[in-house]
Amino acid sequence: MNAQEPGTTHLNGGRGSKASPAGHFTGGDMSKFMCGVWLLLAGVPATAYAADDEWQVGSSPSFSSGGYGTSSRTEVVHTPITARRLFSDGDVTLVFPFTCISGSGGVTVVDGTPVPTNPAVGRAGNGRGPSTPTTALPAVRTTDCGLGDIVLRARYYLVDERGWVPTIALRAHVKTPTASAERGLGTGKPDEGVGVEVSRTIGGGLLAMADGGFTFIGDPDDFDYNNNWWYDVGIGRDLANGLLNLSVFFAEDRAFVPRYANARDILTALTVKGANGWRVQISGSFGLSDGAPDHGFALGASRRF
């Protein structure tokens, strides 16, 4: 999944119901976080969000670990702070991310995804990396932290679900090159992308979801990255009279580096609605290819008012 939105809306059908995976930085073993989320929200009654809510703010810190197509492991901590303005026919979101990368310096964040900085270095064979033998990355590990690329997103609900017609929303985003290219936190170039979201209730309290899009990647002076297509398909269900929602997705993103494997993930998310517009989401992923993190997780909170 591309740069997916932290603090996604609850799955209850209709406008605003689409909850996308939490992006490339989510996923992993959720067991250590489940207890904390339940203790935090135990006894908090569910409440419907007011129809005149105009804002949603939140953050969803995440951790991921993997090779990302290289022969060395890299850990990424990503902390986006989001502010979303809600309208009757859509929303506009501004994302201020802070990112830390710990590893051998072998990856660069491109459109929110770590990719090999030196495409000549990586794993060979089995279609899960470059097809030619490569050398290992340097063993010296460093940690670089700083402001990521600020992203502006917009979404417009084109069609509301009625009968057999699903909810359809159009989306677009622009990435500004505010991250340091020298430290591997970004490319130093802007990106632009468009996409579409589709969701529909299918009975039994289930909501089927699919979205996809295309991002035009701004290339640095020394390398041409592939433009990125992406999609995800999933299903979600409300539980406990709408207090909880559980969703599962499969996501695939085109590899930014030619001849590398596409990123493929299985993602899960548990969303808990609280009082006064609060919600908490815990999510995890398991990578299915070398282009994706081996595993990751995220724990986020947001509030509407």
Image (cartoon, grey):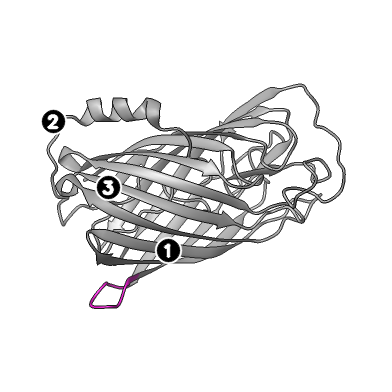
How many numbered markers are drawn? 3
Pointers 3 and 2 in contact (C-beta within 8 Å): no
* 216 with respect to 194 (left or right): right
Question: For the stretch drawn in magenta, what is the main secondary structure?
Answer: loop
Between residue 38 and residue 153, name the one nearer to us.
38
Secondary structure category for the residue under label 2: loop
Report the span colored magenta: 159-167
Between residue 196 and residue 31, name the one nearer to us.
31
The kind of residue on which mark 1 rests is: Ala
Between residue 160 and residue 165, name the one nearer to us.
165
Q: Examine the structure image and report whether residue 107 is included in the region drawn in magenta.
A: no
Residue 288: give x, y in percent of width and height: 58, 47
Label 3 to label 2, Cα distance in Å?
17 Å
- Residue that carries the numbered disc 3 in the rendered image: 245
* Picture disc at residue 22: none
* Picture disc at residue 210: 1
* Picture disc at residue 43: 2
The kind of residue on which mark 3 rests is: Asn
Instruction: Specify few, some or many for label 3: CA neighbours under 10 Å numbering under 14, 14-19, or 20 or more.
Output: many
